[in-house]
Image (spheres, rainbow, N blue to C red):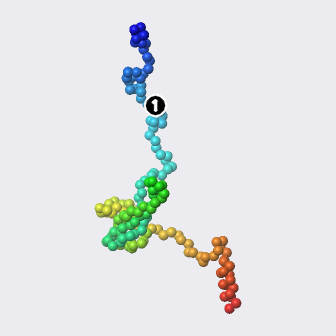
């Protein structure tokens, strides 16, 4: 009995006993990082959703509308290999200038109809250099080419 009396007289100084602590003592400690919202650095460009895509025209029979197939590479969810994923989009072609097989760029716009939210724009052509006659890997004429030239010269 004396033990229980001594335990009752003993006051434990723990703040977590019997819910006697108010919530203000249990709040998170003040940290200078948590008070300021994180902002991206000003030199980084803003991340935006995809506004334009490139694809091939697969159907051009409708008036002022083309169907464009966009192919992208995405990782397979299980095997983690890159797999081609295709999706068709309806695009507005006001002049009916695109034929099947043409490469076009799809620009995002306001909804034109229920299924059309893109405008088809011709892809800018790349500066492709004309191919020279094939020679050896180092630009040296092949021996077979030289022997043919020598045979043709004496005649």
User: How many numbered marks does the figure carry?
Assistant: 1
The residue drawn where x is 32% and y is 71% is: 62
**Residue 89's image quarter?**
bottom left
**Residue 10's image quarter?**
top left
Q: Position of residue 67 (x, y in %)?
A: 36, 67
Q: Secondary structure at mark 1?
A: loop
Give the vertical position of 32 relative to 130 (above or below): above
Looking at the image, can residue 93 be seen? no
The residue drawn where x is 61% and y is 76% is: 134
Q: Position of residue 66 (x, y in %)?
A: 36, 69
Looking at the image, can residue 69 be seen? yes
- Which of the pair 142/98 is nearer the observer? 142
Which residue appears farthest toward the top when viewing the image? 2
Q: Position of residue 128 (x, y in %)?
A: 53, 71
Name the residue that disc number 1 marks: 30
The residue drawn where x is 47% and y is 33% is: 31
Q: Residues within 10 Å of mark 1 (few under 14, many from 20)?
A: few
Give the vertical position of 47 relative to 144 (above or below): above
The residue drawn where x is 47% and y is 55% is: 79
Q: Position of residue 136 (x, y in %)?
A: 64, 74
- Which of the pair 14/31 is nearer the observer? 14
Which residue appears farthest toward the left when viewing the image? 114
Q: Quadrant of the N terminus?
A: top left
Q: Quadrant of the C terminus?
A: bottom right
Please give left or right for residue 67 compared with residue 82 in the image: left
Give the vertical position of 149 relative to 127 (above or below): below
**Residue 106's image quarter?**
bottom left
Give the vertical position of 3 relative to 36 (above or below): above
- Which of the pair 98/45 is nearer the observer? 98
């Amino acid at each position: 009995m004396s033990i229980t009396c001594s335990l009752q007289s003993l006051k434990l100084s723990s703040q977590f006993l019997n819910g006697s602590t108010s919530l203000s003592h249990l709040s998170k400690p003040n940290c200078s990082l948590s008070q300021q919202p994180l902002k991206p650095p000003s030199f980084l460009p803003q991340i935006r959703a995809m506004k334009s895509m490139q694809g091939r025209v697969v159907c051009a029979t409708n008036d002022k509308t083309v169907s464009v197939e966009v192919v992208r590479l995405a990782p397979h969810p299980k095997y983690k290999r890159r797999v081609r994923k295709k999706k068709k989009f309806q695009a507005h072609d006001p002049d009916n200038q695109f034929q099947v097989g043409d490469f076009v760029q799809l620009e995002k716009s306001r909804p034109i109809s229920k299924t059309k939210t893109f405008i088809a724009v011709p892809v800018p052509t790349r500066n492709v250099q004309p191919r020279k006659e094939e020679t050896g890997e180092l630009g040296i004429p092949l021996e077979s080419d030289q022997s043919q030239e020598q045979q043709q010269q004496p005649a």
